[in-house]
Amino acid sequence: MKRTHKTEVNIDLERTVTEAMDIDTGASASPCGENGAAEAEKADVDASWMREALALALLAEAAGDVPVGCIVVNQDGAVATGFNRREAALDPTGHAEMVALRSAATKLGRWRLSDCTAYVTLEPCFMCAGALVHARVGRVVFAAADPKTGACGSLANVLQDARLNHRCEVTKGVLEQEAGALLRRFFRSRRRDCLPEKERLPLK
Ligand SMILES: [Zn+2]
């Protein structure tokens, strides 16, 4: 009787190839360029301001609003801060960016904010992206992307639309894990609050 392990061998081979392909998909670290040190310093500064914006997001959460924070800075340091106050103020325009932009314009005594950078923990929506363009904000740095309402790369790219009279420099993804975790915790908690008490799992 002729015996063969062809099928088993083929399965093993397939598995080996698949595993090898999986391993090969890992990207290797890219070497630092000439401006590596300057870029690293800029990234540190961005992360530092974004941490401040995340702290503001916590204030929104404490007041029952979706945790989003924004801080506007210029060469002299922090100019103004804001956090989402839509529920607290019953204001559909009470997004963190709108609050921070209004405050920055008042403090600087001008509506043109071209020397400013806005750090925001969530990708700005159409309204906020429009306001950032109207305010001529020089640079916008955001953390988590928002595939449902984001207008800075997700649904549109309002901040860099060539048809508009102003375009912002954009940096995305700064502390996105932290910002995303904060939002997930908030929405998980909200869903949990909708359940009867005995069905609620403990929050991690
Ligand atoms: Zn918004």
Image: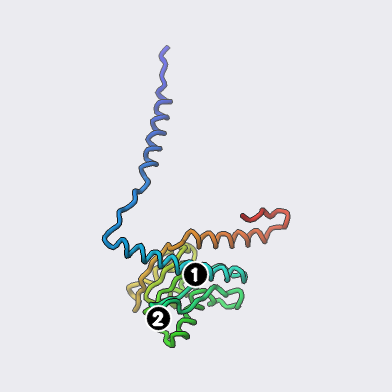
Q: Earlier in the sequence, mark 2 or mark 1?
A: 1
Q: Residue at x 44, y 78 (%)?
A: 131
Q: Which mark is residue 157?
A: none
Q: Nearer the viewer, residue 111 or 78?
A: 78
Three-letter code, disc 2: Leu
**Mark 1 lies on residue:** 52
The C terminus lies in quadrant: bottom right
Residue 105: percent from the left, percent from the top? 45, 84
Q: Residue at x 72, y 57 (%)?
A: 197
Question: Is label 1 in a helix, a strand or a loop?
Answer: helix
Question: Is label 2 in a helix, a strand or a loop?
Answer: loop
Q: Residue at x 41, y 14 (%)?
A: 2
Q: Within 8 Å of ligand 1, the CB of disc 1?
A: no
Residue 169: percent from the left, percent from the top? 35, 71
In the drawing, does residue 195 fall left or right of residue 113? right
What's the coloring here? rainbow
Q: Nearer the viewer, residue 6 or 100?
A: 100
Q: Are marks 2 and 1 in contact (CB under 8 Å)?
A: no
Query: Can you say whether 33 is above or below 95 in the image?
Result: above
Identify the image quadrant of residue 41.
Answer: bottom left
In the drawing, does residue 53 fall left or right of residue 135? right
In front: label 2 or label 1: 1
CA gap, disc 2 to disc 1? 20 Å
**Mark 2 lies on residue:** 113
Is residue 130 in view from this perspective? no
Residue 15: percent from the left, percent from the top? 41, 34
The N terminus lies in quadrant: top left
Q: Nearer the viewer, residue 64 or 6?
A: 64
Residue 134: percent from the left, percent from the top? 41, 80
Three-letter code, disc 1: Glu
Q: Residues within 10 Å of mark 1 (few under 14, many from 20)?
A: some
Query: Can you say whether 200 is above or below 111 in the image?
Result: above
